[in-house]
Image (cartoon, grey):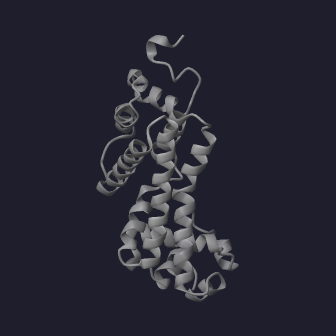
Amino acid sequence: MKQPSRTARRRGEITREDWVGAASEILIEGGISALSLRKLADALGVTTGAFYSSFQNLEDLHQAIRDEWVRRNTEPFSRAIEAAGPDGMDQYLAYVRVLVLDADFDPRFDNAIREWAHSAPETAEVLRRIEDLRIEQLHRIFRTMGFGARQALIRARITYFHQVGYNAMQIRETREERLMNIPLYAEVLTERTDLLGLPDPARVRAYLEGERGARLPPAMVP
C-alpha cells in the first residue's frame, strides 16, 4: 500500500481511498479482529477523528473494503475475458493470465475475505455473490469452447475450486514452476494439448500474453 505523504497528512488530505487501502492491508495481514480505528489511524499517521471526514462509521468502512475487494480481485477477470474476444480458449488463457501474472489480483485478499465471511453475514453474502459470478464466467468460457452445459459447469467448478484451494494452501512454487504447470492444467481442464509443446517459462508467458508466434508449438515456429 502506498502511504500518503507527510504533507498530505499534515494538510488533512487523507482520502477515502487511503483509508480503504490501509484497512484492506490490515485485514489481509491480521484478519478482521486486527482492524481497529486506532490501528488504522496509526498506520496512516493521523488522528482517529480524521476518519469521520470520510466515513460515517466502521460499517461504512467495512462495506468499502468489500467493494474494494470486488474491484481489485474480480473486475480484472471480467476485463480480461471481455478483451480476449469470442474464442473460448483465448478467454480461458486470459483468466489464467490474471491469476498468474496480473499484479492487481491478490490471492491474500481472497483468503482474508473468505475468513471474514465466517463471522460477518454481510461479507458472506458478498462472497457468495462474487463466487457465483466467477464460476458462471468460467461456465460460459467452457461452453464457448464447445462443452455441454453440465460438462462446462463441472469444469468451471473444478477450475475455481482448484484456484481457491491453491490460494488457501499457499502452495510454494516459483513463478517459473507455476508457468510450466499451466500447459498440464490446460490439458486436464480444456482437453487442449497444444500448450504442451512450449519448452520453457518464457514461452508459456508469451503464450498467455498472446505474443505473435507464441501460440505455435516449437517445431512450427518460423
Residues 207 and 36: in front is 207
Q: State the residue at coordinates (38%, 62%).
A: 111
111 displayed left or right of 106? left
Q: Residue 58, position in %: x, y?
A: 52, 84
Instruction: Determine whether 22 is above or below 176 in the image.
Output: below
Q: Residue 94, position in %: x, y?
A: 53, 40
Q: Residue 75, position in %: x, y?
A: 57, 55
Residue 183 in view in this figure: yes
Residues 9 and 179: in front is 179
Residue 1 in view in this figure: no
Instruction: Determine whether 114 is above or below 37 in the image.
Output: above
Q: State the residue at coordinates (33%, 50%).
A: 166
Residue 68 occupies quadrant: bottom right
Instruction: Determine whether 133 is above or below 6 in the image.
Output: above
Q: Residue 134, position in %: x, y?
A: 48, 54
Q: How many marks?
A: 0
Residues 181 and 127: in front is 127
Q: State the residue at coordinates (42%, 72%).
A: 124
Position of the C terminus by quadrant: top right
Instruction: Determine whether 187 is above or below 171 in the image.
Output: above
Q: State the residue at coordinates (42%, 78%).
A: 121
Residue 81 occupies quadrant: top right
